[in-house]
Amino acid sequence: MIGILSDSHDNLPAVRLAVRLFRDRDCELVLHAGDIVAPFTAQELRGCGCPVRAVFGNCDGEKEGLRKAFDGWGAIGEPPVRLKHGRLSITLTHRDTGLDRLLKSSSGGVLIFGHTHRPLVERRGTALLVNPGEAGGWLHGESTAALLDPATLAVEIITLM
């Protein structure tokens, strides 16, 4: 299972619930699509007990602090980040602009993004688009995350709080 979250915006109780969910569901990888905000929030993701990959969002101003927070157990970088998980190709980005360009260059696989604070699971051709919504819950009042089964590409949006 792959855990996915975005736009946590320093909501520590929600991040802790996501970490517990990812541990309980035996996630082998966690992906964060940006807007973690502060290094102390990034440190909470260490509790997932598996590798964590993240991208910077438009509210992640303390980039060097975030890089240091991930040092030794995870990684964060400028979007887009392309990675492989088994045979699955994953593109991780933050903003919802340029998705068509990313889809064309990724030739299928999974494209994960955030920024809109709205959950979305959508097939476009051979690609699967996933936005886990906002883990922080500040904008729309609902904290969400997603679980992706890499074998079946089934996605479940989970309400955290």
Image (cartoon, helix red, strand yellow):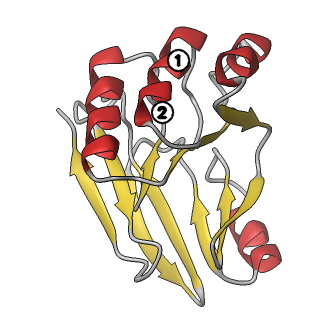
Residue identified by numbered label 2: 7
Residue 138 in view, yes or no:
no
Foreground tag (2 vs 1): 1
Whether residue 115 is situated above or below residue 1 in the rendered picture: above
Amino acid at dot 1: Gln
Q: Secondary structure at mark 2?
A: loop
Whether residue 5 is situated above or below residue 41 in the rendered picture: below
Locate the N terminus by quadrant.
bottom left
Q: Nearer the viewer, residue 116 or 88?
A: 88
Query: Which label number is shown at residue 108?
Result: none
Residue 47 position, x and y percent, is: 42, 27
Q: Nearer the viewer, residue 151 or 33?
A: 151
Locate the C terminus by quadrant.
top left
Residue 158 position, x and y percent, is: 23, 51
Residue 72 position, x and y percent, is: 70, 26
Measured in 3D between alpha carbons, the distance from the residue under mark 2 to the one under mark 1, in whole angstroms, is 15 Å
Q: Secondary structure at mark 1?
A: helix
Please rate how many residues cluster around mark 2, counting C-alpha atoms within 10 Å: few if below 14, some from 14 to 19, many from 20: many
Residue 158 in view, yes or no:
yes
- The quarter holding residue 58 reads top right
Residue at 36% x, 18% y: name it. Answer: 11
Whether residue 125 is situated above or below residue 30 in the rendered picture: below
Amino acid at dot 2: Asp
Residue at 28% x, 63% y: name it. Answer: 156
- The quarter holding residue 17 reads top left
Whether residue 92 is situated above or below residue 136 in the rendered picture: below
Q: Nearer the viewer, residue 86 or 62?
A: 86
Residue identified by numbered label 1: 43
Do the residues under discs 2 and 1 have CB atoms within 8 angstroms?
no
Determine whether, in the image, residue 121 is placed left or right of residue 106: left
Residue at 32% x, 42% y: name it. Answer: 23
Residue at 27% x, 18% y: name it. Answer: 13
